[in-house]
């Protein structure tokens, strides 16, 4: 491949400070790679430009840099498209074609600008694995291709080439292995490019079920599975794609005509056996997904309209500010993966109650977000409450908040005595009138612009 389309990215990013959610962290600078896919359009990784405030693009053997802006992004699939408006950017650029899914053992080239050098880098390898993998940027399980070629910092967002065509975008490396990297494959890239015109942020759908395999013979017999194969639905997230269509105890036999094996895999592209969730990487919100279901002794088909993923504790978010509310110096936030990452090695050292909600909590009609006390800004109205941080809020005057918006509405309506109860049975009692009078003083003392985040202003 002629490499004029491979570019280097210079990014300045500024992420929110989830410990003090009304402010930002210090700006950070980084580099990445990308590939020109159209007139003024550059394809790269979403994590390369996440929370970006300024992006520049530099072509091969060109000392000049061009200002770029994020035109479309899919954080779920770790992909983004940038636009460069300067017409001269396209001079002498040969736009490559987008290829197809490779075969195991196919030779490929990873092209980009890894850190430690100014010139383009090309590493050779072969396709060693094609299956559903965990995407570190989004924590989604999607189809990925493993190659035995080094993908280092700075390579991210660069193209993986086979027969002069782009067959993937480099996006992560395996930390416990040497010279092993992963790329977003062409089918997911193609789906993103076809979907991006309709919206700036493309989200991939989720079915919203928890399932278990049926490899155990006795378990299969107990659900009435004989010659067929499938997986057992354990639970369904409230308000998800499957809510009202599937039930706990259902056995999923087929997905879009693909037989589901007892270990939860299907034969994908008539070549590879991988998780049946592989099909979600090529589907859009609003489309239908067909299942063949065994319920009791009845087998039937059900079409599920796909919706976005729902989590009781939201996974990583980018390009947006956290939700927060301050009352009497007590800072309330929505529990999220971003907040948990305030702890170094958070999966081991984060608050155990929060981790339990992250890994095991489920959305229900009664609770759709977890409101927590993240810290207490010391003031005379909250004396004695300063130790009551990193606790889950359970009720306001006996009413359990459904989500943050519901909680703020309850607080805004409070008069007289306000009693808050936490999951540790801590009690926080305020006088509503005196606390509201203290609000402006506390905000001024700590240099906070408002008592709530912008999304709660309405």
Image (spheres, rainbow, N blue to C red):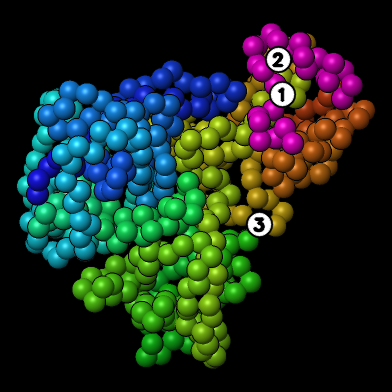
Magenta segment boundaries in residue numbering:
432-458
The quarter of the displayed image where residue 50 is located: top left
Mark 3: few, some, or many residues within 10 Å (few <14, many ≥20)? some
Q: Is residue 235 left or right of residue 378?
A: left
Q: Earlier in the sequence, mark 2 or mark 3?
A: 3
Tell me, yes or no, whether the highlighted magenta stretch contains residue 319.
no
Q: Mark 2 to mark 1: distance in Å? A: 7 Å
Mark 2: few, some, or many residues within 10 Å (few <14, many ≥20)? some
Residue 312: give x, y in percent of width and height: 58, 49
Q: Residue furthest top?
A: 445
* Label 3 with label 1: CB-CB less than 8 Å: no
Q: Is residue 374 left or right of residue 339?
A: right
* Label 2 with label 1: CB-CB less than 8 Å: yes
Q: Residue at x 56, y 87 (%)?
A: 296
Q: Mark 3 to mark 1: distance in Å? A: 28 Å
Q: Earlier in the sequence, mark 2 or mark 1?
A: 2
Q: Secondary structure at mark 3?
A: loop
Mark 1: few, some, or many residues within 10 Å (few <14, many ≥20)? many
Residue on which the image places disc 1: 451
Whether residue 304 can be seen here: yes
Residue on which the image places disc 3: 364
Residue on which the image places disc 2: 443
Tell me, yes or no, whether the highlighted magenta stretch contains residue 434.
yes
Q: Residue at x 71, y 14 (%)?
A: 443
Q: Quadrant of the C terminus?
A: top right
Q: Secondary structure at mark 2?
A: helix
Q: Residue at x 62, y 34 (%)?
A: 323
Give the tally of numbered discs.
Answer: 3
Residue 194: give x, y in percent of width and height: 38, 59
Residue 248: give x, y in percent of width and height: 57, 72
Residue 375: give x, y in percent of width and height: 62, 23
């Amino acid at each position: 491949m002629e490499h004029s389309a491979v570019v280097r990215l210079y990014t300045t990013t500024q992420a929110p400070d989830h410990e003090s959610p009304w402010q930002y962290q210090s700006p950070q600078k980084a580099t990445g790679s990308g590939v020109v896919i159209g007139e003024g359009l550059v394809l790269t990784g979403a994590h390369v430009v996440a929370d970006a405030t300024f992006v520049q693009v530099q072509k091969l053997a060109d000392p000049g840099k061009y200002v770029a802006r994020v035109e479309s992004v899919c954080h779920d699939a770790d992909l983004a498209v940038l636009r460069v408006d300067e017409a001269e950017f396209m001079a002498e650029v040969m736009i490559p074609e987008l290829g197809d899914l490779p075969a195991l053992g196919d030779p490929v080239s990873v092209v980009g600008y890894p850190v430690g050098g100014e010139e383009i880098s090309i590493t050779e390898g072969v396709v060693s694995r094609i299956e559903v993998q965990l995407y570190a940027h989004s924590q989604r399980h999607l189809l990925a291709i493993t190659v035995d070629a080094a993908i280092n910092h700075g390579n991210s967002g660069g193209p993986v080439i086979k027969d002069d065509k782009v067959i993937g975008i480099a996006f992560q490396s395996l930390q416990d292995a040497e010279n092993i990297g992963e790329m977003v494959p062409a089918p997911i890239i193609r789906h993103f490019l076809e979907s991006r015109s309709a919206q700036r942020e493309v989200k991939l759908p989720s079915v919203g079920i928890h399932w278990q395999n049926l490899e155990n013979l006795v378990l299969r017999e107990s659900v009435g599975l004989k010659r067929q194969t499938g997986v057992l639905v354990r639970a369904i997230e409230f308000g998800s794609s499957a809510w009202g269509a599937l039930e706990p105890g259902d056995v999923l036999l087929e997905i879009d005509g693909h037989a589901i094996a007892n270990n939860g895999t299907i034969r994908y592209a008539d070549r590879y056996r991988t998780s049946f969730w592989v099909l979600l990487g090529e589907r859009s919100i609003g489309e239908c997904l067909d299942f063949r279901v065994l319920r009791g002794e009845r087998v039937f088909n059900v079409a599920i309209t796909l919706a976005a993923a729902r989590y009781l504790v939201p996974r990583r978010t980018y390009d947006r500010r956290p939700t927060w509310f301050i009352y009497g110096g007590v800072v309330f936030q929505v529990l999220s993966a971003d907040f948990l990452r305030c702890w170094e090695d958070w999966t081991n050292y984060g608050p155990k109650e929060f981790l339990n909600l992250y890994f095991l909590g489920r959305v229900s009609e009664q609770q759709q977000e977890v409101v927590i006390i993240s810290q207490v800004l010391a003031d005379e109205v909250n004396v004695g409450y300063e130790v009551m941080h990193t606790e889950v809020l359970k009720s306001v005057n006996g009413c359990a908040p459904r989500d943050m918006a519901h909680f703020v509405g309850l607080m805004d309506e409070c008069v007289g005595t306000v009693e808050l109860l936490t999951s540790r049975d801590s009690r926080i009692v305020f006088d509503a009138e005196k606390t509201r009078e203290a609000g402006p003083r506390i905000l001024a003392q700590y240099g906070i612009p408002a008592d709530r985040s912008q999304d709660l202003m309405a």
